[in-house]
Image: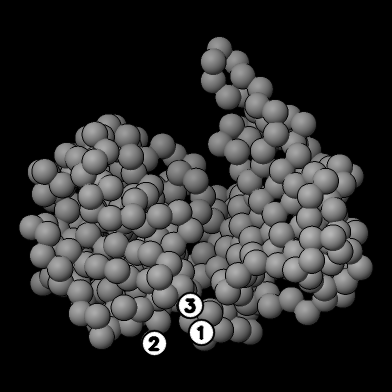
Amino acid sequence: MGSIISKKTAYIYLRGEGVNGEVIKLLSPRIRCILQKGKVDYDSLIELRLRVNEPVIVAFLWGEQMLHSDCGFTTDVNNTYRVEERDIRATIDMVSNYSLYAYEEELKNGFITVKGGHRVGLAGQVVLEQGKVKSVKNISFINIRVSHEIKGCSREVLPYIISEERPIHTLIVSPPGCGKTTLLRDIVRCLSDGNPFCKGMNVGLVDERSEIGACYMGVPQNDLGIRCDVLDGCPKAEGMIMLLRSMNPRVIAVDEIGTREDIDAIEYIINSGCSILATVHGGSIDDIRNKPQLRRLIENRMFDRYIVLSRKQGIGTVENIFDERGNDLYKASLSIAN
């Protein structure tokens, strides 16, 4: 079994590109200064977490560390830099270009996508309007998720999901943080540009959370290939139907399905002759089967392939690849990290 986002893979595909400087610029001056004094493995950087009165936690592909009070990193919680309210305010100002009000719509979803495709999650006191989330105020918690492209990470998966030069209906099953979005993004790129198993084709992408294409001002920051059309920030069920009717895609890709409306739209897409490529949260096929809204996917055999990811050998470990009947097709000797 292989990992699509092992530390080795990160170095192969990311070294020389580094983390977009926009990430460091988002931080408060004090935190930025401490980071810049230390030796940071930017190629492996995944997240920076800021919580008021708590240490700055920096997550890498190989583990996490805490920011030292003066420079670099430490594992001793007593010597860490503690986030102050002014750090949170300064970071929010940078993220929102000093106009958080302008991002009120994004705040309903709990995050803001910044230039470079990086996603900034925000938490605090929720403001409700008629029982629905209107905004978030008194923000005290920030999670900056660094956007990394790992081009080529899908190369060992492609033979399993392409038949007769056409992608077959595929569902990627993965717990949070196990690489499903990274894998989906690279499959989209390979189908759009073409690959050894099929020619390039029109791909329609519904990117409700702006994570796959990481659009900034409507322009994808990630490489989705030359034949990909994106509906950014659009609800999945509506977006799938819109793309089918307007953009003539051969395949439609969508991240994190889960509602009855999503399942209805997928069934409509499949019956229209278009291939579907989707992801869902779960640790196994049984997890999907045990969820009332998703059970229909299994019972009606809507998907031809199920790719199950985990963290067992690092982020993006391919556990299994099943066909629609539950037969395990994956050869353990293959590794999509090498």
Amino acid type of the residue that numbered disc 1 sits on in the rendered structure: Lys
Residue 253 visible somewhere in the drawing: no
* SS for callout 3: loop
* In this picture, residue 40 sits left or right of residue 31: left
Q: Classify 10 Å Cα crowding around label 2: few (below 14), some (14-19), many (20 and above).
A: some
Residue occupying the far top of the picture: 130
* In this picture, residue 151 sits left or right of residue 227: right
Q: Which of marks 1 and 2 is nearer the N terminus?
A: 1
In space, the residues marked 1 and 2 are separated at their CA atoms by 9 Å
Which residue appears at 48% of the width and 81% of the height?
A: 9
Q: Which mark is residue 35?
A: none
Q: Nearer the viewer, residue 224 or 325?
A: 325
Which residue appears at 28% of the width and 74% of the height?
A: 157
In space, the residues marked 1 and 3 are separated at their CA atoms by 5 Å
Residue 288 visible somewhere in the drawing: yes
Given contact means CB atoms under 8 Å apart, are the residues at marks 3 and 2 in contact?
no
Q: In which quarter of the image is the C terminus?
A: bottom left
How many numbered circles are shown? 3
Which residue appears at 48% of the width and 58% of the height?
A: 177
Q: Which mark is residue 6?
A: 3
Amino acid type of the residue that numbered disc 2 sits on in the rendered structure: Asn
* SS for callout 1: helix
Q: Which mark is residue 8?
A: 1
Which residue appears at 51% of the width and 84% of the height?
A: 8
Q: Classify 10 Å Cα crowding around label 3: few (below 14), some (14-19), many (20 and above).
A: many
Q: Residue 338 carries which label?
A: 2
Amino acid type of the residue that numbered disc 3 sits on in the rendered structure: Ser
Task: Say above or below: 330 vs 104.
Answer: below
